[in-house]
Image: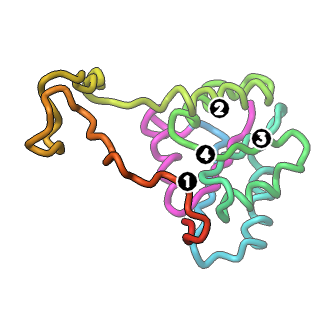
Amino acid sequence: MAGILIIAHAPFATALRDCISHIYGGLPARIGVIDVSPDCDPAQVVAFADSEVARLREENGALVLTDMFGATPANIAGRLATRPDVRVLCGVNLPMLVRAVCYRATPLDTLVDKALAGATKGVHAIGPATPEPVAPPACSNDCLPALPPDAAPGDCIPALPAGADLTQKTDAAGL
């Protein structure tokens, strides 16, 4: 069963672990967290994360989950990706973590696929259905209010004045 290490901005990692504990009625074994604070020394956190992976790792490896690609926690987690049988995923959310916990006994690459699927399938819009788009009014005798009051009944789009100069200006400053 793969160990799981969550590395995220403080207090997100601990909050995710607490959610898993709530969902499962207790904390499943081999789940660790590292909350990265703004004033941390990344080198020290990398060393600690390495020791945590060694502690949590089981026969099929370890999965490291982190919050935001490019941020300090993800950069720390990325250092662990070179370890054998360690996979690192960014963008952790609760559905990803629940899937990871459920599929920990599968081969590591299958676990990665399941966790990624959980992350994306767990994101939905909630609320009333999106209303159907309203079709623009067809040209008819009802003209748009932006037209001048003296516009002819069928003129939905005002025409350019007959003497309008439409040639491109070569000496004018462009955008």
Asked if residue 13 lies in the magenta stretch, the reply is yes
Quarter placement of the N terminus: top right
Residue 49 versus residue 22 in the image, above or below? below
Left or right of 13, for residue 31? right
Q: Can the viewer see residue 170?
A: yes
| First reached walking from the N terminus: tag 4 or tag 1 | 1
| First reached walking from the N terminus: tag 3 or tag 4 | 3
Taking the spot 77% from the left edge, 40% from the top edge, the residue there is 62
Describe the element under mark 4 as helix, strand or loop. Answer: loop
Describe the element under mark 3 as helix, strand or loop. Answer: strand
Three-letter code, disc 4: Gly
**Mark 4 closeness class: few <14, some 14–19, many ≥20 residues within 10 Å:** some
Describe the element under mark 1 as helix, strand or loop. Answer: helix
Q: Which residue is mark 3?
A: 62
Q: CA distance from mark 4 to mark 1?
A: 12 Å
Image disc number at residue 13: 1
Q: Which residue is mark 2?
A: 116
> Depth check: 149 or 167 in front?
167
